[in-house]
Amino acid sequence: MQATARKLAQFQQRSLEEYDLVALFLDGKSFADEQIIIALGVTLDGQKIPLGFVQVATENERKNVESYLPRSEQSRIRRKMEAAYSKPTYEGAKKALDALKPELELMNQSALSSLEEGMEELTLDQCLTATPMGSHGVARH
């Protein structure tokens, strides 16, 4: 585990200044129940440079939270979670999900625990590009 964490940290902290990126490709892949978005930069000479990856919240994670809630609250909380997960930055998503925690705690402790587990799995902070998920530009480092 520590070796993997060390390699991941090196990957995240490496400089990309030497690359003149002219294109950015985002590709989604599914592994079991997980969905990953992979970002590849392409240089003028066609070299593909892995920029980062994002593990996205799955529909199952949202449904898990909802399953603990009264029916009357499910669609409202779903909208809040979807709004949080669609934030352009990790910090924005985390802030929106953190704001939801006190509300879930009052409704159902298991819903809160499920949200927190999903947040632990949410690795948007491991996205190495500064480009927001909805953006079409190429981030420079």
Image: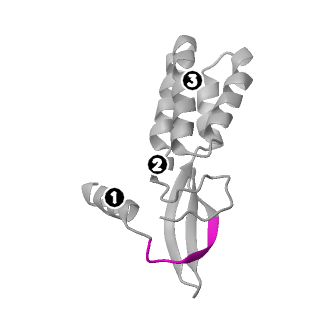
Q: In this view, does 1 lie to the left or right of 14?
A: left
Q: In this view, does 45 lie above or below 75?
A: below
The amino acid on which the numbered mark 3 sits, given as a three-letter code, is: Leu
Give the numbered dot on residue 9: 1
Image quadrant assignment for residue 44: bottom right
Of the numbered discs 3 and 2, the one sitting upstream in the chain is: 3
List x then y, in percent, for residue 70: 67, 15
Give the numbered dot on residue 100: 3
In this view, the residue in front, 50 or 34, is 50
Majority SS type along the magenta span = strand
Q: Is residue 106 magenta?
A: no
What is the CA distance from the residue labelled 3 to the residue labelled 2? 19 Å
Q: In this view, does 56 lie above or below 118?
A: below
Judging by the rendered image, the residue that carries numbered circle 2 is: 125
Residue drawn at the location 44% of the way across and 77% of the way down: 18
The amino acid on which the numbered mark 2 sits, given as a three-letter code, is: Asp
For the residues labelled 1 and 3, say whether their Cβ atoms are less than 8 Å apart.
no
Residue drawn at the location 56% of the way across and 18% of the way down: 104
Give the numbered dot on residue 89: none
List x then y, in percent, for residue 42: 58, 77
For numbered disc 3, what is the local secondary structure? helix
For numbered disc 2, what is the local secondary structure? helix
